[in-house]
Every structure is written in C-alpha cells, then in structure tokens.
Image (cartoon, grey):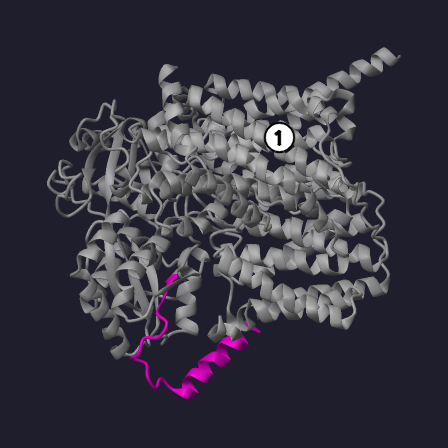
Amino acid sequence: MKKLFAASVVMAGCLFGTANAADIEKPECIAPAKPGGGFDLTCRVAQGGVGDKLGEPMQVTFMPGGIGAVAITLFNTTRTDDPNAIVAFSSGSLLNIATGKYGEWTENDVRFLATVGADFGAVIVRADSEYKTLDDLMNKVKEDESSLAIGAGGSVGSQDWMKAALLLKAVDSDPRKMIYVAYDGGGDALTGLLGGSIDVYTGDIGEMTAHLGTGQLRVLAVMSPERLPEPFADIPTTKELGYDAEWTIMRGFYMGKNVSDEAYDKWVAAFKEAYGTEEFAKIQKDKGLLPLNIAGKDLDENVKERIKKLREIAREAGLIQ
Amino acid sequence: MNEVLSGLSGGFGVALMPLNLFLVLIGCFAGTLIGALPGIGPINGVAILLPIAYSLGLPPESALILLAGIYYGAEYGGRISSILLNVPGDAGAVMTTLDGNPMAKRGEAGRALSISAIASFVGGTIAVILMSLFGPFLAKFALTFTPADYVALMVFAFASLSSLVGKNQVKTLMGAAIGLMLATVGIDANTGVARYTGGIPDILAGFDFLVVVIGFFGMAELIHLVEQQISGKLKLLPIGKSFVSWKDLMQIRWTMLRSSIIGFVIGVLPGVGASVASAVTYGTEMRMAGEDRKKFGTGDPRGLAAPESGNNAAAGGAMVPMLTLGIPGSGTTAILLGALMLFNVTPGPLMFEQRPEIAWGLIASMYIGNLALLVINLPLVGLFARMLTIPQKYLSPLIAVLAFIGVYSVVGNPFDLFLIIAFGIFGWVLRKLEFSLAPIILGFVLGHLFEDNLRRALSISRGDWSILVSTWESIGLYVMAVLIVALPVIIGIRNRRKAK
Amino acid sequence: MADRLFALFALIAGGIYTYVAFFIIKAPFQYDPLGPETWPQVLAVVFLLCSLYVLVRPDHIQFALGRSVWLRLLMLVVMLGGYAELYEPLGFVISTALFCCLLSVMLGANRLHSVAFGCATGIIGYGICDYLLGLNLPEGLLAPFL
C-alpha cells in the first residue's frame, strides 16, 4: 500500500513535470532523527542562519529511523527531485555510507549541498592521569595495544571508535587489538573516564567547553588540521605532535540526486550568502560549532574524498570486506 | 552549611518574584496537559516546550524556572493517564498503573490521583533537600559506580521484580524475557552489528521505548476495553467523589519516606533513573508489607505511593550529576543541560561559582515547582477524574487518538503507528493469557543497561568474570538481591513449621 | 488450550530467535569478550524453557469469544490500520474525524452524535496540540488551510 502510494506520487511528478523547479517554495529541512539531537541542531542553524536568504521561512521536520537510513531511502525512491527539501547529514552519516549501513545507497545517490560547521575529535584523560602528553599515551600504546582501556560514546565502527582506531594506526598498531569500551553517549563515557573505568576518552572538543578549567580533565590533543580558536587555542593538534590522525565532524546537508541544477544552485547561493554574514557566524557559535563553510561542488568533492578515505580505514580495520 | 543556606535564600529571592511565580504555575499547568498525553513524559514534554520557552525572550533564570515547572507538570501529567486509563506516560510510570488503575476502577480515581500527587510531592521535595545538602558528595559516589556495579544493580532490580504481580511465576519470567528480547532488536551498541532487524530500516535503531509502552499498554488496553464492551462484560465504572484521607496519609508516610530516599540514591547514578527506582521501591514496599502483600496490585495506597515517591525522587537525583559535574544522568537532564547551554550557562562545578543566581535559582525553583504541582493539581483532581465519566463509546476512540498523537508527535515516523497496533494485539493476547505486562516493559528498559554494562565490564577486565564481584558495592547488591528473593521463602517455611 | 496454543507459537518464534542468535549474528571481528551473540543466546534459552514449561503445564484459561466479538475486534484492528495508513496522507484532522466517527458508531453511538464527536475531536485536538502545545502533527489535505 505504501509502495503503491509512493509510486503514484512519482507518476504524478512525471506527468506534471517540474515546471518551476527552480522556485523554492516552503523550504524544508529534514532532520533524520528525533528532535533534540545533532541533526536537529544542524537544521536549526540552517533555519536561523540561511532561512531568510530564501525569502520564505524554513520548516524543520523530523524523520527518524535507522540512523538516517529511512530518510536516505525516501530521497532515493519518492523525493529524488524535491527542490524544496534539504536533509541534514554528519560525518557519522558518511561513515554509515562507507560501511554500507545504508544498504544499496551510496554517496553517488545524493547531492551534497553545504555545511554549517564542524566539531573535532579530542583525546581526553583524567587530570590525575599518568599520561601528561599525547606522546606518553602513544608510547604506552606502542608497547602494548591492549594495556589501556579506551572508551567513547559509540559502537565499534562508529565515529568515536574511528578516532581511537586512527590514533592506533598512526603508530602502526592494530586497532583490532585495542580494548575499546562502548558507552551509551558521551555523557556516560565521561562518567566512565572520571570514575576510572576507562583510561582514555576519544570525544569531541565541542562538549569540552563545559569542562575546560574545572581541573577534572586534561585534553591531550585535538584532532583538527590546525589549531582551533579560543578557548581551545592552547591545545595542540595531533598533527603538530607528529601523529597522522585527524577527525573532523562535519555537519551539513544533502538533496535528492535528481534535483535540477537551477534549484541546487539557488540553495548553494543562499548558503554562500549566509556564510558572509555575522548573524550566521553567531548562530554557528551559539550551537557549539566551529566554522567550516563549504558549499556546492567543492563540498561534493570534499565529501566523496572523505568517504573514500573512510572506506579504506574501515577495510583495514576489518569492518567491511 | 551556611553556604547552602545563603545560596538557597538568594535562589528563593529569584524564584519568588511575581513573574517567576506566575511562570512556574503556567509551566506546571502546560506540563500537566502535555504529560497527560500517553507516551509524552517529562523528556519529550520539556523537549517540545523548550523552543517555546526560549522564544519568549525571558531572562535565563526565568526561562529555567518555567522549564522546571513544565518538568514537574509533565512528570505528574503522566500519572493521570496511568491511573485513569492504565496507559503509562513514561518508563517511570509503569509501576504506577499496578495499584493506581485498580483504585480508579473501583471508583476511587480522586483518591488515587491525590495520593499520587502527594507522594510525588514528597519524593520530589525530599530529593531536592537531599540534593542541596549532599549533592557534591553524592556525585562523587556516582562516579565510582563501575559497569560491574551496574550489572549488580540490574540483578538486584530483577530480583525485586520477582515479587511482582502475576499468578504464574513462569509467565512473569517469560514476560521479562520477551521484554529483554525486544530490546535486542536493532544495532548492537558495542559492535555496531544489526540484530533481528530483518533489513527493515525503520527498526535499525531498535524499538523506541515510547512505541513499546504505548503498544503494550495503550493499544492493548483499547482492544481490551472494546472487547469487554461489545461482549457486554464492561461494568459501568462507579464514579464516587473520593479524596485522599488522613488515614491514607498515615498508612503511607513511611512508605513515602523510604521510597524517596531509595529513589534518590538510584536516581543519582547516571543512566539508571525512574524506571529502576520505581521497580525497586515497589518491590521493597511489598516485602515490607508482610502478610499484607496480597493487597498489592489490587489498589493498595502503599503500592501507589512507593513508585510515585520513588520515581520523583529519582528524577531529582538525576539532577545531581548534571548540576555538579555537567554530566547528564538521564534523558531529561540531557535536555535541561541543552537548555542551560542555550542560555550560555555551562553546568558543572563552576556554575555555582560563576552563576550562583542561576544555580541556586534553579534549585529553588525545583522546591517551588514541586509545590506548584500540588497547588495546581489537587484542586483539579475531581476534574481529571471526571474524564472517566466519558461514555465508553467515545472514550475508546479517544485513547487511540491520544496514543497516535503521542507516538507521531514524538517519533514522527508513520511506521511506528503500525508497530503500536501490532504490539497492542500481542499485548492483548498476553493479557488474556494472564501475563502481567509490567515485567515486559521493565525487561525492555533494563535490557540495554544490563547487556551493555555486562559487556563493558568484561571488556575492561579482558574477559575476566571475577570483575563482577570486585567491588563492595556490587557484592552488597548481590547479597541484597539474594535476600529479597530468599526472605519470603524462608519466612514461608518458618510459618509452616510453626503451624505444625 | 489457549495456553498450549500460545506456547506452541512461542516455541516457533523462540526457535527462530534462537537460530538467529546462534548462527546468524556475527561481528566482523571479536571485540568485546561476549560479542553481540551471547546475550541473545542466553535469552533464547530462557525463553524456550519458559515456553516448554507452559506447553507442559498450561493454565486453564477461557479464551472463548463469540464470533461477532471476533468480527468486531477484527474491524477495530482494520480501522486502526486504516487510521495509521491515512494519518499522513489525509492529515490529522480528517483521518481522526473519520476514525472517531466510525469507531464510535461501531460501539453504539448514533450517527449524528458520532459525526459531531469525530469532527470535534479532529478540530479541537489539532487546535490544542498544534497551536497550544506546539506538537508536530500531519497537516495532510488541509495543509493549505492550517
């Protein structure tokens, strides 16, 4: 029944054509999750920072199910050419694409549109930990991969695990041998770290704002390509410490793959216009994101390159064949 | 101590301003309304009303006070549907149905609602007092709780469950197993492997708790009601004017106190919270009742007061790690944490130093939110109870409409509407076969906690099972678990010997 | 009898669950000592034992319902299914009005009352939920007017 309905919508779409596909009517931002999470936040940035560049207020709708699989399936079956809707994605979604969690749908089945900001991985230990620097930690890892317990808020194969795996790979250790403890979200993992159940927490720098200066935690390194602005300016990057382990958490949007170039360009233009405004920068900052503004073709290339890399890592780590 | 008092008096100064008092009352009322929708508990209530509170452009302390009102209101609103319709609003309210609904079916809806309001008030208030006094100390205790200790806590929670309702113990166990099995559907939190999803993307992330509870309770209740009505077995409910009596209060005073303290301590532990607290307090009170035990499940005031005090105290306890450490211990506090961040307030140890007016204002508003709940809801008890006077032919469709609103507005996936119907049919069959539904729900809620913590503990120990009994906390919990199961058996044997 | 039948179904469903637990679920590589399959395996065994117990020693339960009762319950389920199917396409107001109207007629309300009841529930329900509480409900066919 559902399929029948879907099919009739597609047919109707074909019959009536896409007469004014370039006009964006009732812009809609789809957060492929329940309200309150990271995707909600991603859409809110677009709603507040880009919405007024389209001439009409943007609506946020939620489409939970299968860590985003439901939304990507819908945009590959019925709404492939919807010019009015954008769907939020994050690096986690890209990882899901790379590891085949979205079934048959790949990066070539959607058009990546624009980003609204980024967060970066961070290597965190307790303030009283014996590891004072990242070098201390990495030397220990080199000695024996399974000598310390690394924990974070996601499962094996998730972004959080990837951060830890990348660190191990940077010193030619086998990620499969590490002791990884999967917690239910960052808050739980932090509790585990503070309580001494795990030795290292591979979290995000954004959530550390609340803990800087409390004297409970020490951020050994941030996994960004360059030093971050205040209040994180004192934290060294993994790269400058000599470890090739970078993890950028990208937040942005994609559209259906059959969306007309006109409509796509119009959206890209709206985002690019917004990037220049102070208002957008403020919303970005308020939502705890660091600037990372890429739109249009640049992003599409950037994302495809990322997914390629992710696939390699996943294959090496044994997540996919 | 002086510090606490001066902080609190400052906080009350903020919370008692006319605007803030007005806000807390409004928040309580709106929260009660939204919480009364089945499935929309405090988490979703606060999440849904948060943007509205934010858009009003209030100063941060006022907005937080409004949210505290909404929080307590939604917490209480969930009790209304549990008691009147046998449809729990959230995980913590499942145990409330056990004695609350029979009481309402006896025509004492007013009594049940007022007992629940008072027990909630007591639980909430004791939790806030304990929090003001021992917050930082307790937060440190919560941190030392390792995954292995959580496993012991889960064993203890299931042991408390063993005393639960149901004529047939095997069916109680089977129900818990069904709940635990439902919890294994979806992506495994440790390895990311999909289990029992059958390739359906909609359940890749597992069943939403809301869907399970509305299906097994709300929809099953609806089918049951319709069946009773069309087969002519439905007796018209007696709607008497009833209210909590002095005798009731005397009977439940120690129950409330005990349950509040137990609930608070459990609530402080991150990740556990109201559902475990209500199960444990209910089980404990049933043990304490001795020979009166048989009255539990038939509308005993103690069986209603215990989970109500327990889950409200747990909700208060969950604030401790958030306020003192900046770690959200439950879904609701995660949302409150987000709300604080929206106002550029960062919870954690620094909040009390940097923004004392907000930290103490929030705590003071919890005292006032609790009181507002009592003030708003006690006079309305009669009005809510009148809901049951709606003729059955209209009430039944309304239950379905409310259930659909709850599921759709929170989860937003039409697939879940079909899921609740399927769970409803299954739940109705189980009910016919004299299964108790509470163990299913608790099994479902505790399943993830149990499995994930067990596997975490074993990861940390590299597969060495002795980690499970390596701390005093865990050993203590196992001893209590054995006692709680063994005591009635021992007492039973002794009584039989005496009889000989 | 009903208990036996149920136990039989439980054994079949439990059997499938058990099979999947023991032969299908596998992690790409063993990470934690238990892996994703151990916990379901334990549950499967407990569930099968319970089912067997119920099969051997069933309770005596009356599950006899008249044919007309079964028929109406089936109608209820069909109505619920239709309500779920049409919830998004028609929108909250129309689908709710239809559902409430039909179900209350089946439960014995007279036609006029049930139509009034259905429309009132749809419109007032939407008003309260959408405008007062800010809940997200489908607009459906009435989207241009809401």
**Is B95 on the left or on the right of A102, as rendered?**
right
Check the picture and name the quadrant holding the C terminus of chain B: top right
Which residue position is annotated with label 1?
Answer: B119
Residue A177: quadrant of the picture: top left
**Is B116 on the left or on the right of B340, as rendered?**
right
- Indicate the chain on which mark 1 is placed: B
Picture coordinates of residue B279, whole percent (x, y): 61, 32
Seen from this angle, which residue lies furthest bottom?
A15
**Is B236 on the left or on the right of C18, as rendered?**
right
Please tell me whether mark 1 sits on a helix, a strand or a loop. Answer: helix
Picture coordinates of residue B497, whole percent (x, y): 84, 12
Nearer to us in this view, B239 or A128: B239
Indicate whether residue B334 is drawn in magenta. Answer: no
Nearer to us in this view, B251 or B382: B382
| Residue segment shown in magenta | A1-30
The tally of labels here is: 1
Picture coordinates of residue C59, whole percent (x, y): 82, 42
**Residue at 76 percent of width and 54 percent of height:** B225
**Is B394 on the left or on the right of B156, as rendered?**
right
Amino acid at pointer 1: Ala
- Evaluate whether residue A48 shows in this view: yes
**Residue at 65 percent of width and 71 percent of height:** C98
The 10 Å Cα crowd at callout 1, few under 14, some 14 to 19, many 20 or more, is many
Nearer to us in this view, B453 or B400: B400
- Evaluate whether residue A248 shows in this view: no
Check the picture and name the quadrant holding the N terminus of chain B: top left
Indicate whether residue A12 is drawn in magenta. Answer: yes
